[in-house]
């Protein structure tokens, strides 16, 4: 796994522009986003993580990987619904992961074209798959395609971190968060990642 080539440059720019974020970055000096590389892995892992804690998601994911060690679409399809449910997935998430596996196995997604497509075009294709909404697509852009300027305004972790560090814990609207994030461009993914770390120092992996 490798660190995005823009990471150090982005850190320096963010620290110059935003003193609050600079303090967060300084508190986490030796960690960075790691490129995982496999699109199916990233999307399946993101589906598992929807609306549950990082700890719970990690536990379920370990069982899924034990069931399908290579995390390939055909392995998931061969495992079947009952065995996916035994990993701790909800009925709906088991259906979503199986549907994702079918899309990959049948070649229904333009995976090879994604690196050359813009962010919104990738999101538009991904959200046609059951179980993938905008948040999951944004996680894919950040963790797999390593897009540097994604701002997942619907992410609860980002919302909590901004409220904590910029507003003394007071809740604010996504519009306000977007305004705060204006100075982060074109490195909003990096800013988001460090704000996540302020809540949980152990990097989540998608």
Image (cartoon, grey):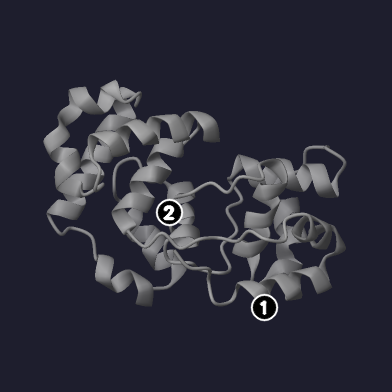
In this figure, which residue is indicated by the disc labeled 2?
137
x and y percentages locating residue 142 in the rendered image: 50, 60
Q: Does residue 55 appear to the left or right of 80 in the view shown?
A: right
Q: How crowded is mark 1: few (under 14 residues within 10 Å), some or many (20 or more)?
A: few
x and y percentages locating residue 145 in the rendered image: 43, 66
Q: Does residue 57 appear to the left or right of 71 in the view shown?
A: right
Nearer to the camera, 179 or 151: 151
Q: Is residue 136 above or below residue 7?
A: above
Q: What label sits on residue 158 in the rendered view?
A: none
x and y percentages locating residue 116 in the rendered image: 36, 77
Asked whether disc 2 touches disc 1, contact meaning CB atoms under 8 Å apart, the reply is no
Q: Residue at x 71, y 40 (%)?
A: 160
- Cα distance between the residues tagged 2 and 1: 25 Å
Mark nearer the N terminus (2 vs 1):
1
Nearer to the camera, 205 or 170: 205
x and y percentages locating residue 169 in the rendered image: 83, 37
Q: Is residue 46 above or below residue 63?
A: below
Badge 2 marks a residue whose secondary structure is helix
Q: In this view, does 89 lie above or below 69?
A: above
Badge 1 marks a residue whose secondary structure is helix
Q: Residue at x 43, y 56 (%)?
A: 140
In this figure, which residue is indicated by the disc labeled 1?
9
Quarter in which the N terminus is drawn: bottom left
Q: Nearer the viewer, mark 2 or mark 1?
A: 1
Q: Residue at x 24, y 48 (%)?
A: 70
Nearer to the camera, 63 or 94: 63
Q: Which residue is drawn at 45% across and 67% down?
A: 119
Q: How crowded is mark 2: few (under 14 residues within 10 Å), some or many (20 or more)?
A: many
Nearer to the camera, 97 or 205: 205
């Amino acid at each position: 796994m490798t660190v995005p080539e823009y990471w150090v440059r982005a850190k320096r720019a963010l620290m110059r522009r935003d003193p609050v974020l600079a303090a967060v970055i300084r508190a986490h000096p030796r960690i960075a986003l790691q490129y995982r590389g496999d699109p199916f892995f990233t999307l399946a892992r993101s589906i598992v993580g929807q609306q549950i804690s990082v700890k719970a998601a990690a536990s379920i994911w370990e069982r899924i990987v034990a069931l399908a060690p290579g995390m390939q679409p055909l392995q998931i399809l061969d495992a079947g619904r009952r065995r996916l449910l035994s990993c701790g997935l909800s009925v709906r998430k088991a259906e979503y992961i199986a549907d994702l596996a079918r899309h990959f196995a049948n070649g229904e997604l333009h995976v090879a074209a994604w690196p050359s497509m813009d962010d919104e075009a990738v999101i538009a294709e991904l959200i046609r798959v059951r179980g993938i909404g905008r948040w999951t697509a944004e996680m894919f852009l950040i963790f797999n395609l390593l897009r540097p300027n994604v701002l997942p305004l619907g992410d609860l972790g980002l919302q909590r971190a901004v409220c904590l560090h910029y507003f003394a814990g007071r809740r604010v609207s996504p519009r306000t968060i977007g305004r705060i994030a204006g100075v982060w461009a074109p490195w909003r993914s990096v800013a988001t990642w460090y704000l996540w770390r302020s809540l949980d120092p152990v990097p989540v992996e998608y």
